[in-house]
Amino acid sequence: RKEVEQDPGPFNVPEGATVAFNCTYSNSASQSFFWYRQDCRKEPKLLMSVYSSGNEDGRFTAQLNRASQYISLLIRDSKLSDSATYLCVVKGNTGTASKLTFGTGTRLQVTL
Amino acid sequence: EPEVTQTPSHQVTQMGQEVILRCVPISNHLYFYWYRQILGQKVEFLVSFYNNEISEKSEIFDDQFSVERPDGSNFTLKIRSTKLEDSAMYFCASSLTSYEQYFGPGTRLTVT
């Protein structure tokens, strides 16, 4: 089983649509969870951390279900500028500078 | 807003040559990382560095790789004898705590 698994997409949605991405992780000892976005040939940029209680940042809502080892990202009112690859990222607790483990990403294309 | 910077943006080298990739982490950050991304694949962890020593390294980070923080600002990745399969985008990241990591724009390494 992959450490972090995501549907690669692409998800093609019209502007204004709501879209949801899901992710599962295999290591139940994982401590921290994030969504990053990556534009083509650019660096991953931190979109938001994911907390156990769920959290929202503007149009973006992230949820974590530790029992199911499942993370989600909901984007409301999609904009053209949301077109990117969304990376589900998990961090362990193996030391003081724990590595990030990335999923392969889900590609989103928002169209007019 | 402070950023991680990396030089060069693109490096072309011949197989067997040594390369040094340079990074300037965000100035008050304490944790430093190198990741790589082969074209079309996911981002992979190479090494983390804290308190002037390696905290964790992956299987990819073999004897051909080394890291150094030669002064108070730079963080370097050296590949001693490059192979064709080392061709990838190399990202440096830093974090203040061991929580959220911020990535530089990357160095595209092409080994011919």
Image (cartoon, rainbow, N blue to C red):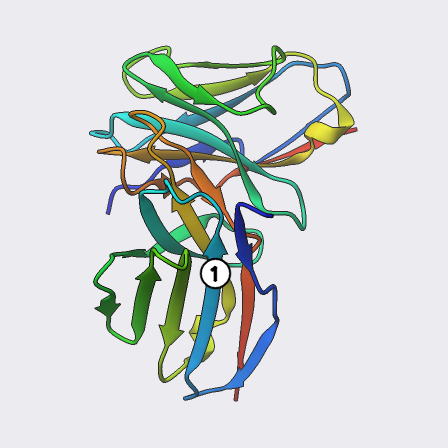
Q: Is residue A8 above or below residue B83?
A: below
Kind of residue indicated by mark 1 = Cys
Label 1, secondary structure: give it: strand
Question: What number of labels is visible?
Answer: 1
Q: Chain of mark 1?
A: A
Query: Is B55 rendered above or below residue A103?
Result: above
In-image side of A94 versus B28 (left or right): right
Most distant residue in the front direction: A67
Which residue is drawn at the image coordinates 25% and 42% (left, top)? B2
- Residue at 61 percent across and 71 percent down: it is A10
Q: Position of residue A60 (x, y in %)?
A: 31, 71
Dot 1: within a 10 Å radius of its alpha carbon, few (fewer than 14), some, or many (20 or more) residues? many
A26 relative position to B48: left or right:
right
Q: Whole-percent x and y of residue A101? A: 47, 42
Q: Position of residue A98 (x, y in %)?
A: 36, 31
Q: Position of residue B29 (x, y in %)?
A: 24, 30
Q: Is residue B82 above or below residue B36?
A: above
Residue drawn at 34 percent across, 61 percent down: A65
Q: Is residue B111 left or right of residue B109?
A: right
Q: Nearer the viewer, residue A17 or B59?
A: B59
Residue nearer the viewer, B54 or B23 = B54
Residue at 22 percent of width and 33 percent of height: B97
Depth order, front residue of B49/B92? B49
Q: Nearer the viewer, residue A80 or A100?
A: A100
In the rendered structure, the answer to whether residue B1 lies left or right of residue A89 reads left
Please name the residue that numbered disc 1 is placed on.
Answer: A23
Q: Quadrant of residue B18?
A: top right
Task: Name the quadrant containing residue B102.
Answer: top left
